[in-house]
Amino acid sequence: MTESKSPRRRSLLKGAAAAAGAVAAPLAYAQAAPVSFRFQSTWPAKDIFHEYANDFAKKVNDMAGGRLKIEVLPSGAVVPAFQLLEAVNKGTLDGGHGVLAYHYGKNSALAIWGSGPAYGLDSNMVLSWHYYGGGKALLEEIYKSINMDVVSFLYGPMTVQPLGWFKKPVAKVEDLKGLKYRTVGLAVDIFTEMGAAVNPLPGGEIVPALDRGLIDAAEFNNASSDRVLGFPDVVKNCMLQSWHQSGEQFEVLFNKAKYTALPQELKSIIDYAVQAASADMSWKHADRNAKDYEEMKKQGIKFYKTPDAVLRAQLAAWDKTVAKKAAENPLFKKVMDSQRAFAQRTGQWHNDYTIDFKMAYNHYFAKKT
């Protein structure tokens, strides 16, 4: 006869089985096949923006410990820059790195995150509005309205973008009239309102177009990108300061089905990698842009401050542009109303508390006369 197991023995066996299960679960998870995501940026491989895309991917890859690997391809490797959103939505790409203004053709409201004066918010404050003032929910609503099944993360506050590169310095508003000029997003409408003939070329096509005389002037983004793309080789005058894109940021996109299928810990890694990349990007941006700015001065590039009359004309053109867009597109108005309310609430605090850092800079570095 087989001896029956005592209650104590049965309890010990159950405990051992449970312990074995607890050990087996992590082992099974660790042995699961790693997930690979193929990304594409909207930037040429040599651009610092593509470097930022790789920086983000590296943070995810390092933290994921082999469970998730993001490979980033340069603009045009799979689709042209302006087709990134569609490709991620369809699953042709698992994700991408770009800016919302590049999706302007899908819904004009998408450009609000990067174009115009944002009621006086700088790029970091625009990101604050996005994450804490209702912008994120509005962006999701817009994507749903145009049937784009994507997950979007915004990060990376950019510096104020120059008015751009010109064959002759801009001295007055009239100098823009009839000028063949490159920009993107709602800036297209701003400069059209100011009388320019606008061509929204993607980044990699701008300098060749300038060189061949297809356009007379252009803006892209910052000292490092402008230098590596070759602007100083074809044009010698750069106008600094503008309202057309004074608060832009980057977007990391994921195909929604691919993202949703990830375990929660990998989703959390992506979330925290976005936040870490945002800080890292802003620090690297300051260092590299300052160096490239000085190098371009050594090359003989002349930098000019955009006249205040041109800046005021931009604000007036922006007001006309957004009034028209808001009348045509209810979502556009909804986004503008949200951003305005946040700016009115936070802008007073920001302006009252922020000191004029130029005073201290001039105290130490300005030439004494």
Image (cartoon, rainbow, N blue to C red):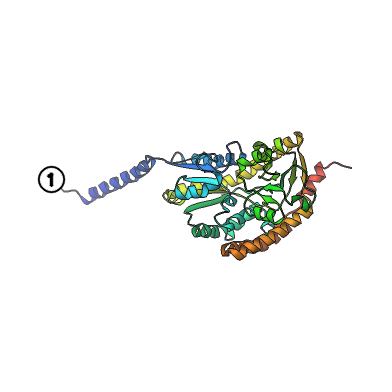
- Mark 1 is surrounded, within 10 Å at the Cα level, by few (under 14), some (14 to 19) or many (20 or more) other residues, namely few
Q: Is residue 253 left or right of residue 158?
A: left
Residue 224: x %, y % from top left: 67, 39
The image quadrant where one finds the N terminus is top left
Q: Is residue 170 left or right of residue 259?
A: right
**In the displayed structure, would residue 113 be above or below residue 269?**
below
Closest to the observer: 86 or 60?
A: 86
Q: Residue furthest top?
A: 299
Label 1 residue SS: loop
Closest to the observer: 176 or 241?
A: 176
**In the displayed structure, would residue 86 be above or below residue 43?**
below
Q: Is residue 33 visible?
A: yes
Question: Circle 1 is placed at which residue position?
Answer: 2
Closest to the observer: 358 or 78?
A: 78
Residue 100: x %, y % from top left: 58, 51
Q: Residue at x 49, y 58 (%)?
A: 144
Q: Residue at x 60, y 42 (%)?
A: 49
Closest to the observer: 319 or 263?
A: 319
